[in-house]
Image (spheres, grey):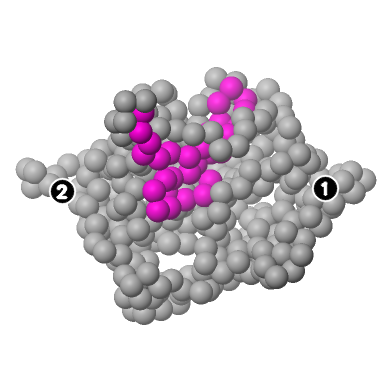
Amino acid sequence: MPRLTKAYRNAKVVEIDSSSRIVIFSDSHRGDGSLTDEFRKDRDIFEAALQQYYDDGYTLIEAGDNDELWEYSKPHHIIKANPEVFDRLRQFHLDKRYIRIFGNHDMQLRDPEYVREHLYLRINNVTGRVEPLLDGLKVEEAVLLRHKNTGQEILTVHGHQGDFSNDQAWRTTMFTFRIFWRHLHALGIHSPSSPTRNSGQRHKVERNYVRWILKHGTALICGHTHRERFPIGDDAPYFNSGACIFPDYITGLEIVNDAISLVGWSVVPDANGYLHVAKKIMAGPRPLADFARHPDPVRHRRPEKSLDRWKIIAEASAHPSVG
């Protein structure tokens, strides 16, 4: 919780209103196109979604773990393997509609010198010439969306804050991942310590998110767990954008017309049987005003019920035989 609070205090403030159009993707884990590259199977879907959002005037927030720098130590290999994706990212960047947040798997991006060295320029695959890419990019730890009219705030982070092995001890975890789990990853075996694979660890992280929300009265958007989340009813306003490495679809969050939605993109057939990339609304839209909260102890009774419900869900998920 103190790590999230520190991120909140140092966050980049982005003012929004009813005309704002924002899309949030996290956990792309872009790789070098090899067998261990989980992003490879969803690359075309991701590219199509980005182009649609660019054409529709959205601002793109990449909320961490978008480049897999634990597994692939050389970013230029990632850029070379995904030229069209980075072409689209550059479109957003040139229009000042691109915001980048670092996560645990691309923690190196918190260093401005690292960003300058690896993301400002690239080598053109066709001409072999060095050309600008994301020159001038500043990578953030957190972004605070603040409504111009109501003052309502939504904190956007990757969500690794306070997850010890992926935050304070990230260098050690990266080292073991790179020399050990990376090779097993190629065989479909994943590290059991990751919150994406360990339900107990995932629910622990998510319970901490909810406690922070109830204490500070601020809605929270995360990635990290790869589990998309959208609050129902009086649930605490915790949102998770999911990931862009599912077997045949990607997920993200949209904020449009003062409302938020959870969306998924996948390849589907049309009425004539032709395949195309299409968007599906998975949850919402719900007005942002529904999620306005205040850290008032007198009003914590109802939110605490929401927290108790989260505990019950977490325990049931960790022990499927219960209930």
For the point 40% across and 53% down, the residue is 247
- Amino acid carrying label 1: it is Pro
For the point 34% across and 48% down, the residue is 42
Q: Residues within 10 Å of mark 2 (few under 14, many from 20)?
A: some
Query: Could you say which is closer to the camera, residue 38 or residue 282?
Result: 282
Residue 33 within the segment the image draws in magenta: no
For the point 43% across and 71% down, the residue is 190
Magenta residue span: 241-270
| Residue 97 position within the rendered picture, expressed as x and y whole percent measured from the top left | 41, 31
Query: Could you say which is closer to the camera, residue 319 or residue 222?
Result: 319
Instruction: Pick out the residue farthest to the left.
Output: 127
Location of residue 173 with respect to 152 vertically, above or below:
below
The circle drawn on residue 211 is none
Instruction: Pick out the residue farthest to the front.
Output: 272
| Residue 297 position within the rendered picture, expressed as x and y whole percent measured from the top left | 89, 48
Q: Please identify the quadrant where the C terminus is shown.
A: bottom right
For the point 51% across and 74% down, the residue is 192
Left or right: residue 280 versus residue 290 is: left
- Amino acid carrying label 2: it is Ile
Location of residue 135 with respect to 41 vertically, above or below:
above
The circle drawn on residue 123 is 2
Left or right: residue 100 versus residue 80 is: right
| Residue 248 position within the rendered picture, expressed as x and y whole percent measured from the top left | 39, 48
Instruction: Pick out the residue farthest to the top.
Output: 19
Of circles 2 and 1, the one toward us is 1
Dot 1: element: helix
Question: Is residue 132 shown to the viewer in this render?
Answer: yes
The circle drawn on residue 303 is 1
